[in-house]
Image: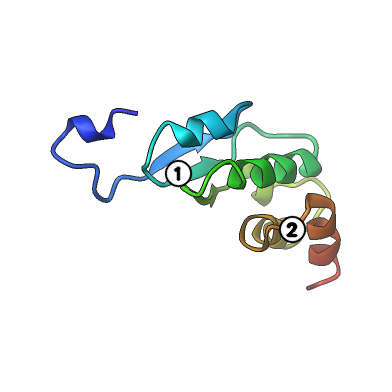
Amino acid sequence: MVAAVGGSSLHTWLKLPYCEGYEQVAGATSCPILMLGGAARESRHTVLEEFAAGTRAGPNVRGCLVGRNVLYPGALDPAVMARAVVHVVRDDMDPTAAMEQAASGD
């Protein structure tokens, strides 16, 4: 990351999709990172697993920006998917437990 090449990296947040080796991505910068939701996934569980792994990659991974994977989760209510993402990202909950908790209405 070359954020420091300019005058300042103050107020600079990076929006990066999850990928294999995200620990290395997070370790390559001191800027805060928001994970992008990425391509549409068939499995809601895969989305939650990626967010869980990404948020554990480093202290500068601060959250996620989600879209289609939460807004259009197939037959699932989008509110349930949104609550599951919150449990995974904010509460550091296992993806399976997060989905069960979210489906129960919290």
Left or right side of 40 for 101: right
Where disc 1 sits, the SS reads: strand
Identify which residue is drawn at 79% across, 64% down: 102
Q: Position of residue 75 (x, y in %)?
A: 83, 50
Q: Callout 2: 10 Å neighbours few (<14), some, many (20+)? A: some
Q: Which residue is mark 1?
A: 33
Q: Which residue is mark 2?
A: 93
Residue situated in front as seen by the camera: 48 or 27: 27
Identify the colour scheme used. Answer: rainbow
Q: Tell me the kind of residue under disc 2.
A: Met
Q: Position of residue 67 (x, y in %)?
A: 58, 46
Q: Callout 1: 10 Å neighbours few (<14), some, many (20+)? A: many
Who comes first in sequence, dot 2 or dot 1? Answer: 1
Image quadrant where one finds the N terminus: top left
Image quadrant where one finds the C terminus: bottom right
Q: Position of residue 78 (x, y in %)?
A: 71, 57
Identify which residue is drawn at 65% across, 45% down: 51
| Snapshot quadrant of residue 46 | top right
Q: Tell me the kind of residue under disc 1.
A: Ile
Left or right side of 12 for 59: right
Q: Is residue 72 above or below residue 5?
A: below
